[in-house]
Image: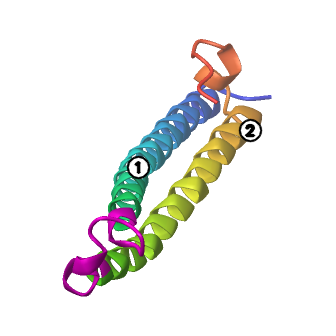
């Protein structure tokens, strides 16, 4: 069937494929972490901006300063909303991508891979 060279080559190819899979998972996890942090920070900033608008609304103590400060806070909130939506959408997409990537690597793992031998912890 297989001679010694072919088995050695198959093993080397499997090790190389396993290394490439781990690198792809690590890159996806690093990008996910960056966009997750960006989504959390922009979301907190958006919420804080919206909360600071309330004292400038009609009937509140700082309504007389609406023209000076209040409308600029509304513009800031309007600018932060797309930033938050973009970073949240990207982090959700990257989360789905990395989850699918791990599932594919588990399903189609080469021989002697961590996904086939079960020597890793589940991170889904």
Whether residue 35 sits left or right of residue 90 in the image: it is: left
Secondary element at tag 2: loop
Q: Quadrant of residue 61?
A: bottom left
* Marks 1 and 2 in Cβ contact (< 8 Å): no
The residue wearing badge 2 is 108
Q: Quadrant of the N terminus?
A: top right
Tell me the CA gap for discs 1 and 2: 34 Å
Residue at (58% x, 16% y) in the render: 121
What is the x, y in percent for residue 80?
A: 38, 71
* Mark positioned earlier in the residue sequence (1 or 2): 1
Q: Is residue 11 magenta?
A: no
Q: Quadrant of the C terminus?
A: top right
Residue 48 drawn above or below residue 111: below
12 and 79: which is toward the camera? 79
Residue 78 drawn above or below residue 7: below
66 and 44: which is toward the camera? 66
**Mark 2 Cα shell of 10 Å, populated few (<14), some (14-19), many (≥20):** few
Residue 76 drawn above or below residue 39: below
Q: Which residues are magenta?
A: 54-70
Extreme left residue here? 68
The residue wearing badge 1 is 40
Whether residue 48 sits left or right of residue 93 in the image: it is: left
What is the x, y in percent for residue 17?
A: 55, 41
Residue at (34% x, 63% y) in the render: 55
């Amino acid at each position: 069937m297989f001679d010694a060279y072919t088995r050695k080559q198959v093993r080397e190819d499997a090790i190389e494929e396993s290394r490439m899979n781990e690198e792809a998972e690590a890159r996806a996890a690093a990008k996910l972490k960056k966009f997750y942090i960006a989504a959390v920070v922009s979301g907190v900033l958006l919420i804080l901006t919206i909360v600071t608008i309330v004292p400038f609304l009609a009937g509140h103590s700082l309504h007389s300063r609406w023209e000076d400060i209040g409308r600029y806070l509304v513009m800031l909130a309007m600018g932060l909303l797309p930033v938050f939506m973009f970073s949240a959408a990207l982090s959700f997409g990257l989360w789905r991508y990395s989850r699918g990537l791990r599932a594919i690597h588990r399903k189609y793992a080469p021989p002697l891979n961590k996904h086939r031998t079960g020597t890793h912890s589940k991170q889904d």
